[in-house]
Amino acid sequence: MKVFIATKNEHKMKELSRILTPMGFEVICEKDLESPIKEVEENGTTFEENALIKAKAGLECTGYISVADDSGLCVDYLDGAPGIYSARYSGVHGDDEMNNKKILKELKNVPKEKRGAKFVSAIACVFPDGRSFTVRGECHGYIGFSEVGNGGFGYDPLFVGEGGCFGLLTPEQKDKVSHRGKSLRLFEKEIKKYI
C-alpha cells in the first residue's frame, strides 16, 4: 500500500520510513513529487490536531493516503513545555542546538528527581474517502544534565529513557523504545481496521 509521509523534516522522514517500510508500506515523500507540498500553519492545540493538519495537507497535495507525525518533549518541571512548541522552543524553528541549550538553562540546578519528562508522538492518517484516525505513543524518562552522544535528533542528546540516553542509541535501539516507534506500532494495528 502506498502512503505519503507529510513532513519536511528529513530526520522524521528517515525514521518514519525505516519503521513503515518493513510493515509493508510503499513510502512516498516530498522528494518523490514534482513540486513541494505547501507549508501549513500548525495552529492546533494538541499533537493530534497538528498531525491531522499536516496529514490533510499531504492528502490534498497528493491524493494518496497521508501520514503525519507531530511530536515533542514535555518536561514536568516546565509544566509540560515545550510541548507542541518543541521544534521552535528557542524562537527559531528546527534549531536543535538552541532548543537544547534553552532546556538546560531552564533546568539549571534542578535535581534529577524533578527533571521528569516524556516524549510524545501523535501519528495521523487521512484517507481520500474522508476517514481519518490518530494514535499516540509516549516514552517516559528524564532530562540529563548535559548533551550526550550524537545520535538521533532534536532533544535526543538530553533525553534519558528506557535503554539510556537517546543520543547514544542506534536507530534500531531507539525504534524499539521511542515514542515514534510506539505510535507507529499502534498505527500498524489501527490501519488494518481501515483497509
Image: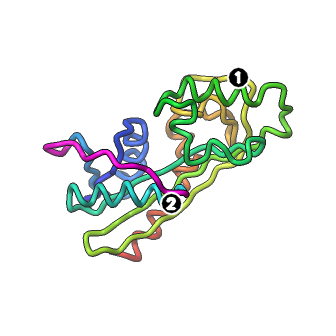
Against 131, residue 40 (above or below) is above
Magenta segment boundaries in residue numbering? 32-45
- Image quadrant assignment for residue 65: bottom left
Q: Nearer the viewer, residue 73 or 15?
A: 73
Q: Quadrant of the N terminus?
A: bottom left
Question: Which numbered tag is attached to residue 146?
Answer: 1
Position of 120 with respect to 19 (left or right) is right
Q: Can you give x and y, in whole percent of width and height, for residue 95 in the image?
A: 49, 27
Name the residue tied to disc 2.
Answer: 48
Residue at horizontal 67%, vertical 47%? 118
**Amino acid type at image mark 1:** Ser
Q: Can you give x and y, in whole percent of width and height, for residue 138 in the image?
A: 62, 54
Q: Nearer the viewer, residue 81 or 27?
A: 81
Number of numbered labels in the structure image:
2
Question: Which numbered tag is attached to residue 64?
Answer: none
Q: Earlier in the sequence, mark 1 or mark 2?
A: 2
Q: Can you give x and y, in whole percent of width and height, for residue 30 in the image?
A: 25, 44
Alpha carbons under labels 1 and 2: distance apart = 30 Å
